[in-house]
Amino acid sequence: MSTTRTFPPGFLWGSATAAYQIEGAVAEGGRGPSIWDTFSHTPGRTSGGDTGDVADDHYHHWREDVAQMKALGLRAYRFSISWPRVQPGGSGEFNAEGIAFYSGLVDALIDAGIEPVATLYHWDLPQELEDAGGWANRETAHRFAAYAERMAAELGSRVSVWTTFNEPWCAAYLGYACGVHAPGRTNGADALAAVHHLNLAHGLAGRAIRRVLGAQAKVSITLNLHVNRPDDPGSAADVDAARRIDAIGNRIFLGPLLDGAYPEDLLADTAHVTDWSFVRAGDLETIRIPLDVLGVNYYSTGRVRRLAGARDGAALPSAWVGADDVEFLEQPGPYTATGWNIDPGGLTELLASLHATYPDQPLMITENGAAFDDVVGPDGEIHDDCRVAYLHDHLEALGVALDEGVDVRGYFVWSLLDNFEWNSGYSKRFGIIRVDYDTQERTWKDSARWYRELIRSGALPTTA
Ligand code: FCB
């Protein structure tokens, strides 16, 4: 294949990480415990009992990591701020040492010519707030806004884009409905309350950031929007199954964030789970703020149908609250090491459909990438051709969306470094840079060299 697709000038080429996945140093520098410390230290919750205690030890290696980013030619770096590192209990006292860590990182990025794109919440809620009810408790939204306001004051206009949340879908449903992520709770009504309080917290925080920094502050949120197709497009039941999943997975966020309302069909679908009385007068006005850019994370697609027969009583609670009668079917391959199907066309489809509904909304791919079982060759090299092909094909799919007029401003590879992949622990490697967890040595995979060349040339190079 030889393609020479080019990208618009100013297209933001970046890479992404998250605090708990890379930092380690969980008990250093005044950091308080988060729900992920508690969860990962609970037996049986993560693969191999892995925890983020050390991870990539980025807390001590950050200067070297910024040097790696500079060598890659990254134009932007998307990182997350650990709330319990800067405010150990999630309310009250802030921790100067924690704030200084992020301030130093931001300065170093700017010195290296890299735009800091900061996420305020990538799932590491201070444990004290979880003990008070977590995201099912409305008060957490107000605590989050106070934290956001303080970070805006501290880091100010040095941060290019302020992302309030990463994937609130995961925080709410994986954390509170099916319990495979921290805090590991399994209550559908709590999960829906958590969704609303995350949405509310976004609006409160975005307003607080603009209050501190003025209208020029760029505010964003990153969603993992789901492309779920009906198994049989001719079946009304399957089409309805896809509609329900779209409502509970996508429109439950897009509706309040961009349209100022929860969709009627969502409220009807979930009426047997909750009466939605946690939505108070004024909340929907608070949530809807202009988004300078909407972050989209994309990995794979799904296929659904109406469940034939009863749901298996022994099955884990579903992440898809109120949609117990929807069945997810195995997708055709190829697959990555996480078992996710590779379907670049889904990215074009997702971007086109977002653009059709919200034509004036700028978009950014804030995560895309793949875990593969990387092999270190005898020469110490990692020839991760599968990852290069994955990235190539998804960028080609993004390019098709650009051709169709979709306003996509940038692309961030997940991830810069191999890291702690949540409940999969260290068993899944997503990095374009390998991390040896015994020595903390960083080694560029072929995909890192490939990405550097792509950024340098702005043209999608030949892969085969
Ligand atoms: C996303 C998360 C990110 C990482 C990738 C693989 O859902 O935002 O932290 O785990 O998946």
Image: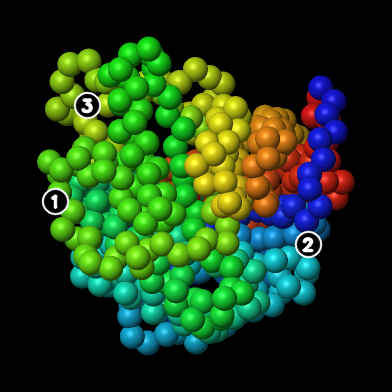
Quadrant in the picture for the N terminus: top right
Residue depicted at x 39% and y 79%: 146
Position of 232 with respect to 311 (left or right) is right
Closer to the N terminus: mark 1 or mark 3? 1
- The residue pinned by badge 2 equals 70
- The residue pinned by badge 1 equals 275
Residue 45 image point, x, y percent: 31, 47
For label 1, the crowd category at 10 Å Cα-Cα, with few meaning under 14, some 14 to 19 and many 20 or more, is few
Closer to the N terminus: mark 3 or mark 2? 2
Q: Within 8 Å: ligand 1 and the Cβ of disc 3?
A: no
- The residue pinned by badge 3 equals 325
Question: Between residues 396 and 353, which one lies in front from this camera angle?
Answer: 353
Q: Kindly indicate the quadrant of the structure image that contains residue 17.
A: bottom right
Question: Between residues 29 and 119, which one lies in front from this camera angle?
Answer: 119
Q: Which residue type carries mark 1?
A: Asp
Whether 122 is drawn above or below 214: the answer is above
Residue depicted at x 49% and y 76%: 209
Question: Between residues 282 and 95, which one lies in front from this camera angle?
Answer: 282
Question: Between residues 367 and 254, which one lies in front from this camera angle?
Answer: 254
| Alpha carbon separation for disc pair 3 and 2 | 49 Å
Q: Which residue type carries mark 3?
A: Asp
Closer to the N terminus: mark 2 or mark 1? 2
Residue depicted at x 42% and y 85%: 94
Residue 324 image point, x, y percent: 21, 31
Position of 65 with respect to 368 (left or right) is right
